Image: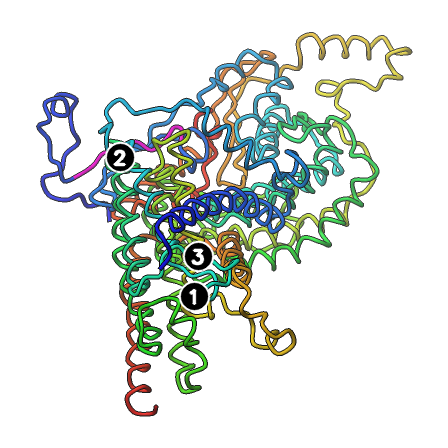
Amino acid sequence: MTERPAGYHALTVDEERRGDFDTRFMRINVGPQHPSTHGVLRLVVDLDGERIVRISPQIGYLHTGFEKTMEHRTYQQVITYTNRMDYVHSFAHDLAYVLSAEKLMEARVPERAQRVRVILTELNRIASHLVFLGTGILDMGALTLFFYTMREREQLLDIFESVTGVRMNFGYFRVGGLYRDVPESFEHDVRAFLAGFPKMLDQYATMFMKNDIFVNRTKGVGVIPRERALEYGLTGPSLRASGVPLDFRKAEPYSGYEEYAFEVPTSEEGDAFARFEMRFREMTQCLRIVEQALDRLEPGPVQDPDRRISLPPRSELETSMEAVIFHFKLVTEGFHPPRGVSYVATESARGELGYYLVSDGGSMPYRVKVRVPSLINLQSLELACVGGLFADMVVNIATLDPVMGDVDK
Amino acid sequence: MDPLWVTLIKAFVLCLVLLGAFAYMTLIERRILGRMQHRHGPNRTGPFGLLQPIADAIKSVFKEDIIVTNADKVVYVMAPMISIIFALSAFGAIPGGPAGSLFGFNPWVVDLDIGVLYVLAVTSVGVYGIFLGGWASNSKYALLGSLRSSAQIISYELGLGLSVLSVIMIAGTLNLREIVEVGVWTVSPWLWPPLAVAFVAFVISAIAEVNRTPFDLPEAEQEIVAGYLTEYSGIKWALYQMSEYVNMMTAAAFISTLFLGGYRGPYVLERLIPGSSEWPIIWLVLKMAIFMFLFIWLRATLPRFRYDQLMRFGWLYLFEVALAATLLTGAVIAFVL
């Protein structure tokens, strides 16, 4: 599939200037400002007619130096940055980070906090897949589904707003628990969403899964075979579309995912249609998880009572000198994890996501390395696109679902 | 035949009407799309957004008119004009009512004996506007768009031409007014199946001919930015938009005239109010409105075809279906009637 035609080689600048080059191929620059590169992805594409001969993603337009900045922030402050990478599935980044930091600190997160984290992360996963569905089909020229998915996403964002105070870049999880407890309306709102959403999913299905033009545009397009997907380190729904049932919620359960019954949908085809279908079916599983977590949500504390990590309650500050000292230490310099490293693999809407933290015993991480799914999944773009048509490239970008903040960090 | 000055005035009035209709079609389209997509559409400028087209027009006229540095300037400026001139001229042959029904005037600009050929020919010349525009822009996206457009129009011209043949064979004339007067559906019930097939094939080809969803590849935003329109701005861009909408209206009027009795009113209503089917303009406009709504509805519903799928659809299905309809019509005329 990735075979290049005989006699083909990438042009040097000199060759291009002299005009001494093969005119069979046209080099076209897609992005960083282009309607369907999902952000600031730039692709240099060589075309033979409308067929793609070579494709090379150029990234870094959104590079923000998050990893380096994190080395100069205390462990709790880092959370401000984590959710800004993948702004579509923010809670996944927050969760991945706090899990890793909690592993360093050996914190014990109360059950209620665990459940709320799972509910929010799964709801956010649905919101992320809704953006995927809407924009994915928008890339094929169908306008309407986008507005429908945004309507449902709005309902989710309202829930997130009532919980965290913001609609984006939540920063609600803390090392050791949550920033605060969820509001009283939370359970009611989530149940309302759970009741209404399956009907919407059926509506989406009639709008695209059963639409002949959509099926023709995606079936057999951008096939990534199982072996190549594994070689390229593809993870997440895109990997499961190629027939590998790897889901870190099942493979290495965290945050109590082992307690919930859910399935990991897989498909053998590995084409764009399968990638659409995986995310579509995954939404139903998210609903199942949320429902179970909500049923088991008991009242209780949402912060680890360990004074090394969490602030003491306000009432104690007036009576206990100890509490004032702990409060002072936490506010001024944060906590000090022991020397060591930690990594927890989690499943974001896009694939394997983990924070590799190195602690030198100080109050700030010595090194942070984020294993972001979008960046690594984006490598497979070449596999999917070369040999296909220019119009398929758009479908392939959409189905690999990169978020540029997640790619460039 | 009208005297020359009458024809000239009618042509002028028709152009004004078409351009006014274009302006309000954009508003209607955006409002209908809004309704279908769970949002409002433009409703702030004047009551129900009625002043929106005027605001848009003022904006397009006063916008900076950019001519790309490396563009072929003459062709670049001419291309949108070619588009709009041919789009406007095509409509002239379409009759709006029976002879002398519009205050004693004939409700058409010209009454051509080869009206069908004229409309087909002039609408397909319009593709030069798109092709030259894309070529002259000296931009790769525009080039891809214009290539797609040419390939598409060549493939769909065939289906379009072939499906008209059934109507021509039944009516025995190429004059659009006479086709309406014959009333193709009233000739014989045996002709209904081939006519129905030809009708469907014609509608599909016509959508492809005017570059609307799901055949809007030349300006496929998500792939090639805006296709041949990429480098155009201001009034030149507006001219292209105008020609797209005028082409839509021509296509709608052409379909109505060929297959749906054009300016004739419904039979049932004629029984209730005698003479109602002789009213000029109104019936044609109502029939056109149905197709305009169909075009908008499709745009809200369907994804876009891929280039190769579109070609395959045109050559393998539409062409064959139209051919079958033509042969069937011929067989019915030869052996049954």
Badge 1 density bin: few <14, some 14–19, many ≥20, Cα 10 Å: many
Name, please, the residue furthest toward the bottom. Answer: B336
Pointer 3 and pointer 1: residues touching (CB < 8 Å)? no
Label 2 – label 1 distance at C-alpha: 39 Å
* Residue B140: mark: 2
Q: Single out the mark in the foreground, 3 or 2.
A: 2
- Please state which of residues B73 and A260 is positioned toward the viewer in this rendering: B73
User: In the rendered image, which residue does mark 1 sit on?
Assistant: B257
**Marks 3 and 2, Cα distance to the nearest angstrom?**
27 Å
Cβ–Cβ below 8 Å for labels 2 and 1? Answer: no
Is disc 2 placed on a helix, strand or loop? Answer: helix
In the image, what residue occupies the spot 37% across and 33% down?
Answer: B236
Q: How many marks?
A: 3
Does residue A12 lie above or below A233 as drawn? Answer: above
Q: Is A303 displayed left or right of A20 in the figure?
A: right
Place residue B110 in its image quadrant: bottom left
Per the image, the residue denoted by label 3 is A214
Tell me the magenta residue range.
Answer: A25-33
The amino acid type, in three-letter code, at marker 3 is Phe
The chain carrying label 3 is A
- Residue A131 point in image, percent of width and height: 55, 42
Bin the neighbour count of mark 3 within 10 Å (Cα to Cα): few under 14, some 14-19, many 20 and up: many
Q: Residue B283 in the image: x percent, y percent?
A: 54, 63
- A32 is within the stretch colored magenta: yes
Q: Amino acid at mark 2?
A: Lys
Q: Residue at x 48, y 41 (%)?
A: A351
Q: Mark 1 falls on what kind of element?
A: helix
Front position among marks 2 and 1: 1
